[in-house]
Image (cartoon, grey):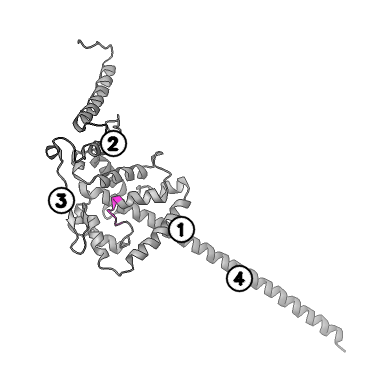
């Protein structure tokens, strides 16, 4: 059947792009014999499209499965428990937990609840300030550079080698950092779930203090922070640091406000006592003056 002639080259390109997307959908349906679990995006520049495609292909009953299975990144296994990690950053953070006291889980849950209460009370504008990567640093890496590297990495074919939940968390976290209307506002429960996946369940474990940062991003790990397998972990760590810093600053401001109120109450009480004492002294003087012979 002869192809229809189009007057505009731009229109022809647009139709060609759309047909390409339709062909992709058709190919996936034919390959797996059913509809994809997630709808495919028409935006070729969307990093989520890679994740959607991987999700559709990542099914054990797929015909010819061994031939279509992408290479997987080598996981690091903890020697003291059964857990394993895609990112060396998350792995180093996890093994530090084994060196701490047995109260680490209790402390983590307590801080998680307090941090959730802080996040949920923020206004949209306050939340945007907290999640922004502008003018922040992770070691020698600027937050803006980290966000750009993460956005670029999510469009690379190598992203297929990483665990799907890890990559999806990175994509969603990037949307939050960029304050996209589709992602903000977001509840603490949903946000923390994303940070759990980005950190491979090390979120709020072992703290985010400078000493912890120096340990986690030491030596070769620091040099490899922008590697594909570490980018999501690095972004999650910096995001967590910003969130905790804002929470601590809020607590300090609240403590200062309470202290100021207490001082004002004490000063008011002292003035009241001075007035009472003055009235009492004045009354004594008048009484003495009246009875003076």
The residue under label 4 is 266
- Name the mark nearer the viewer: 3 or 2: 2
- Residue 49: x and y in percent read 27, 35
Q: Residue 264 carries which label?
A: none
Q: Are marks 2 and 1 in contact (CB under 8 Å)?
A: no
The residue under label 1 is 250
Indicate the secondary structure of the residue bearing disc 3.
Answer: loop
Q: Earlier in the sequence, mark 4 or mark 1?
A: 1
The residue under label 2 is 37
Q: Which of 12 and 193 is in front in this view?
A: 193
Spatial CA distance of label 4 from label 2 is 65 Å
Visible residue check, residue 139: yes
- Residue 288: x and y in percent read 82, 85
Q: What stretch is highlighted in magenta?
A: 197-202
Indicate the secondary structure of the residue bearing disc 2.
Answer: loop
Looking at the image, which residue is at 46% across and 45% down?
Answer: 124
Q: Do the residues labelled 4 and 3 touch (CB within 8 Å)?
A: no
Task: Specify whether residue 201 is painted magenta.
Answer: yes
Number of numbered discs present? 4
Few, some or many residues within 10 Å of mark 2 (<14, 14–19, 20+): few
- Name the mark nearer the viewer: 4 or 3: 3
Few, some or many residues within 10 Å of mark 4 (<14, 14–19, 20+): few
Q: Do the residues labelled 4 and 1 touch (CB within 8 Å)?
A: no
């Amino acid at each position: 059947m002869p192809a229809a002639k189009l007057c505009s080259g731009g229109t022809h390109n647009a139709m060609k792009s759309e047909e390409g997307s339709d062909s992709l959908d058709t190919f996936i349906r034919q390959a797996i014999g059913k509809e994809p679990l997630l709808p495919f995006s028409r935006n070729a520049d969307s990093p989520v499209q890679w994740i959607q495609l991987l999700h559709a292909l990542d099914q054990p009953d797929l015909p010819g499965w061994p031939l279509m299975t992408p290479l997987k990144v080598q996981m690091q296994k903890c020697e003291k428990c059964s857990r394993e990690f895609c990112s060396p950053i998350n792995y180093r953070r996890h093994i530090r937990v084994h060196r701490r006291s047995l109260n680490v889980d209790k402390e983590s849950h307590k801080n998680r609840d307090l941090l959730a209460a802080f996040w949920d009370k923020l206004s949209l504008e306050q939340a945007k300030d907290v999640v922004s990567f502008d003018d922040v640093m992770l070691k020698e890496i600027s937050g803006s550079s980290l966000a750009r590297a993460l956005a670029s990495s999510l469009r690379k074919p190598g992203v297929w080698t990483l665990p799907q939940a890890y990559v999806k968390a990175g994509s969603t976290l990037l949307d939050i950092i960029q304050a996209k209307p589709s992602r903000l506002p977001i509840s603490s429960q949903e946000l923390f779930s994303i940070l759990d996946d980005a950190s491979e369940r090390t979120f709020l474990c072992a703290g985010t203090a400078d000493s912890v940062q120096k340990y986690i991003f030491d030596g070769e790990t620091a040099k490899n922070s922008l590697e594909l397998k570490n980018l999501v972990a690095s972004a999650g760590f910096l995001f967590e640091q910003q969130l905790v810093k804002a929470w601590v600053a809020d607590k300090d401001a609240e403590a200062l406000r309470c202290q100021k109120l207490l001082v004002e109450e004490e000063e008011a009480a002292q003035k009241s006592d001075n007035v009472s004492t003055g009235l009492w002294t004045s009354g004594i003087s008048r009484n003495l003056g009246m009875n003076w012979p």
